[in-house]
Image (cartoon, grey):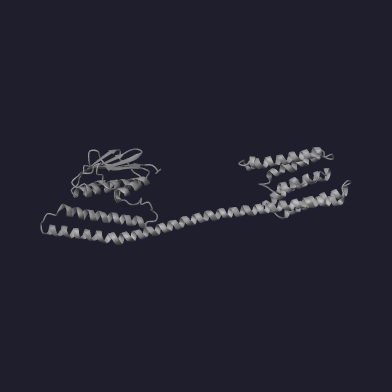
Amino acid sequence: MTFLRGWHPLAVDSALAAVVAAMLSATVLVTPQAGALDLAAVLVGSLSLVAWRRAPLVPLAVGTVSMLVFSVHAQPGPPAAFPVLMAVFAAVWAGHRLLPALAGAVFLGVSLAVNLATATGQSPKDIVQGTTLLLGWFLASAVTATVTRQRQAYLEQVEQRAVEAERTREEVARRRAGEERLRIARELHDSLTHSISVIKVQAGVAVHLARKRGEDVPGALLAIQEASGDAMRELRATLEVLRDTDDPDGSGAQDSRLDRLDDLVDRARSTGLAATVTISGVRHELPPEVDRAAYRIVQEALTNVSRHAGGAAASVRVDFGGDELVVQVDDDGLASRDTPPVPGVGLLGMRERVTALGGRLRAEPRPEGGFTVRAELPLGEPT
């Protein structure tokens, strides 16, 4: 019933039993032969339907006996079969077969025998036809319960298959992602490791020969040697992250943290870039992904200053707040609002990192000249 939809099952069953009890009580009142015993039998048989979900055999037994008392004593006709029909449906729906059939046969057989023995104004043919009609209703009730049970089992099976298919898709996606990570790791190793190793070895040889001849080692050569060593360490850390399927977000990479900010700035200074660092707020432990993103943003910003703002000075500011970490890199280069630089892959990577963390990024020329990169990174879960 539509008006009962959404109710608790016990409330629905209680309402159903009350409706049946009211209908049969009205039948008792209009049946001449009925008395107090019949009213009690009707109430007991109807109210037992409250348990049809939790204990379907209880209303089957109680309803069959009670309605037989009412049917044999008062002979009300088909209405006496209503609670038994519902109890048969409940028992078959719960998976029982023999007991519902036995209850229906007992009710119809006893009712037929009593009606044939005591009928005065009705022909035996009419009595048998009425009993046959009730038998059809009992069969229809059992068939409906069987179909309902099978449909429910089918829906549960479909739901289980959907859950299994979703789990399988997730496993396939994880496996493919892992395979792609390994492929990228192999490509990075094959394409970059050899080249960086050659640069590092050549720089080391040049430094060694210069010192052996007693010559001053150029600062740029030392910077190349140091940068190539750092690049090798970071590349190895990146390859380890890519190969580690238990660390898919790269939280295990330790070489890309703000703890190494001083080394990063010193390396930038060794290339001739005048750089300063200002840290404000109370320094505290950062979420790994925020820590790593902040380091990469500073790294990319300083690299861009060295490459595109020749001779410019850079200032790095890191503000440790309670709710967010603010990283800002300013330079006094030639960029202006009239001739803004063309965004490259580095700025795109910065924006992707910040967006993934639910933060905000501002990368644009400054009014007084030069360029600014400001990233505001929340310290909570990304939104």
Using residue 168 as the reference point, say whether residue 92 is left or right of it.
right
State the quadrant of the N terminus. top right
| In the image, residue 233 above or below residue 69 | below
Q: Position of residue 16 (x, y in %)?
A: 69, 42
Pick out the residue farthest to the front.
Answer: 338
Q: How many marks?
A: 0
Of residues 260 and 249, the one nearer the viewer is 249
Query: Residue at image x 77%, y 39%?
Result: 25
* Residue 275 seen in render: no
State the quadrant of the C terminus. top left
Using residue 312 as the reference point, say whether residue 319 is left or right of it.
right
Q: Position of residue 146 (x, y in %)?
A: 68, 54
Q: Position of residue 33 (x, y in %)?
A: 84, 40
Pick out the residue farthest to the left.
Answer: 214
Query: Residue at image x 74%, y 40%?
Result: 21
Of residues 360 and 333, the one nearer the viewer is 333
Of residues 369 and 251, the one nearer the viewer is 369
* Residue 210 seen in render: yes
Q: Position of residue 116 (x, y in %)?
A: 86, 50
| In the image, residue 239 above or below residue 18 | below
Query: Residue at image x 28%, y 55%?
Result: 233
Which quadrant of the figure has residue 75? top right
